[in-house]
């Protein structure tokens, strides 16, 4: 599934800008709208590939991505 396909399912859902390649699908639960889901490790790996250390990538993810709650459509991040 692509982000464009997901946007058709829930056009109000938020997306993690710049991390499109880490999108893996969406999550659902009772009485909640479908919400985008990203692979945490893939985001970290992408940041490392862009030239930051693994420690910096993990810290950035924890504080700036996973730590950014912006409402009920905030994306989920999965650890596999």
Image (cartoon, helix red, strand yellow):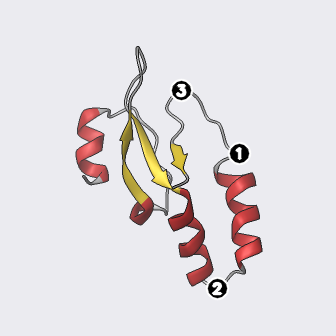
| Mark earlier in primary sequence (1, 3) | 1
**Side of 11 relative to 52 (left or right):** left
Q: CA distance from mark 1 to mark 3?
A: 14 Å
Q: Position of residue 7 (x, y in %)?
A: 29, 41
Q: Which residue is mark 2?
A: 51
Q: Position of residue 60 (x, y in %)?
A: 72, 62
Q: Which residue is mark 3?
A: 72
The secondary element bearing badge 2 is classed as loop
Q: CA distance from mark 2 to mark 3?
A: 32 Å
Residue 72 against residue 62 in the figure, above or below: above
Tell me the number on the disc at residue 67: 1
Tell me the number on the disc at residue 45: none
Q: Is disc 2 in contact with disc 1, using a CB cutoff of under 8 Å?
A: no
The secondary element bearing badge 3 is classed as loop
Q: Position of residue 21 (x, y in %)?
A: 40, 65
The secondary element bearing badge 1 is classed as loop
Q: Residue at x 47, y 52 (%)?
A: 38
| Mark earlier in primary sequence (2, 3) | 2
Taking the view exactly as shown, the residue that stands out farthest to the front is: 80
Residue 47 against residue 51 in the figure, above or below: above
Q: Residues within 10 Å of mark 2 (few under 14, many from 20)?
A: few
Residue 22 against residue 4 in the figure, above or below: below
Taking the view exactly as shown, the residue that stands out farthest to the top is: 31
């Amino acid at each position: 599934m692509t982000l464009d396909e997901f946007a058709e399912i829930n056009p109000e859902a938020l997306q993690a800008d710049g991390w499109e390649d880490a999108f893996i699908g969406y999550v659902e639960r009772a009485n909640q709208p479908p919400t985008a889901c990203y692979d945490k490790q893939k985001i970290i790996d992408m940041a490392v590939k862009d030239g930051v250390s693994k420690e910096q990538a993990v810290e950035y993810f924890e504080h700036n991505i996973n730590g950014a709650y912006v409402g009920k459509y905030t994306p989920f991040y999965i650890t596999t």
